[in-house]
Image: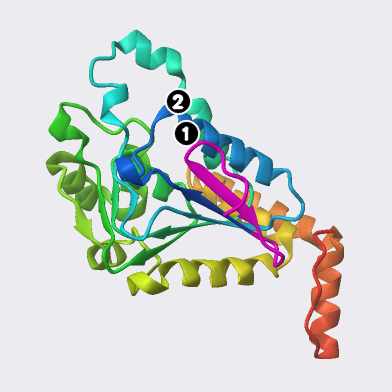
Amino acid sequence: MANPTAAVESEVNSDGTACIRIHRPEAKNALNQQVREALAERFDAFAHDPDVRAVVLTGGDEFFVAGADIKEFATASAMEMYSRHAEYLWRAIAAFPKPVIAAVNGFALGGGCELAMHADIIIAGESARFGQPEVRLGLMPGAGGTQRLVRAVGKFNAMRMLLTGSPISAADALRMGLASEVVADSDTLSRAQALASKLAALPPVAVAQIKEVVLAGADLPLDSALTLERKAFQLLFDTQDQKEGANAFFEKRSPVFEGK
């Protein structure tokens, strides 16, 4: 793939999609500081790239991300961990305004599970295994695992995963709401890319507003969230894409959305 940055590779495709691949096979794609910085840089760049409308995030055929790199924190002090400010790097992914589809084969554990949960859609191969095993190291998730997991699968499923550290299968992840689809391992990336291409053809402003309102509204009282939804809905009537969509519907043709 083009544009390698450390152990993260990326490319932009002609259909308005981009692919970001973590490629650190010697460490099962474990997240170290270098990988986190490279991911943040790529997501920040694609957030401002008008040619990118949707992103696929993936690892290898055998593992997505097996966890954080234990070598980097095994003997660290609290102040050393604090001074790294890893939350700033995660924020570039959490605040990414365009759709992110995670294509997950193999292990997505610890930081890998947290990374997958930063996506908007998770396509899991049959081999995928999701888990938060930090408790087995005398730790707990530190990049959103305790918060995003409970929002995705509910308190009781989340507590079982967090307190035992035991991974779950792709089938269980789908049943619990931690995956959007489960496909054959050989189809994981192609399915994610096809879905990203479909999203990239939709009106970018409407897509961005849907993502923003869903994420922001989840932490608001219902009445406030509904107000946010209503205002965003009204705003879209000032876009050219809304008029193009309506005209294409009446003219029985495919719309061409320009993000205006």
Secondary structure, magenta segment, majority class: loop
Image position of 251 with respect to 183: above or below: below
Q: Residue 114: within the magenta?
A: no
Q: Marks 1 and 2: in contact by CB < 8 Å?
A: yes
SS class, disc 2: helix
Location of residue 21 in the rendering, given as x and y in whole percent from the top left corner: 49, 51
Q: Which of marks 2 and 1 is nearer the N terminus?
A: 1
The type of residue carrying mark 1 is Arg
Please state, as top left, top right, bottom left or bottom right, where the C terminus lies in the image.
bottom right
Q: Report, in whole angstroms, how far the alpha carbon at label 2 lies from the one at label 1.
A: 8 Å
Q: What are the residue bounds of the magenta stretch?
A: 1-17
Q: Considering depth in this image, is 249 or 54 the residue closer to the camera?
A: 54
Q: Which residue is drawn at 12% across and 43% down?
A: 164
Q: Return the residue at label 2.
A: 86
Question: Horizontally, is 175 left or right of 47 in the view?
Answer: left
The one nearer the camera, 232 or 92, is: 92
Which residue sits at x=25%, y=68%? Answer: 171
User: In this image, 36 relative to 73: left or right?
Assistant: right
- Image position of 38 (left or right of 76): right
Which quadrant of the structure image shows residue 26?
Answer: top left
Q: Nearer the viewer, mark 2 or mark 1?
A: 1
Q: Quadrant of the N terminus?
A: bottom right
Label 1: state its secondary structure. helix
Kindly identify which numbered label has been placed on residue 36: 1
Q: How crowded is mark 1: few (under 14 residues within 10 Å), some or many (20 or more)?
A: some
Q: Is residue 226 visible?
A: no
At a point 71% along the width and 54% down the height, the residue shown is 232
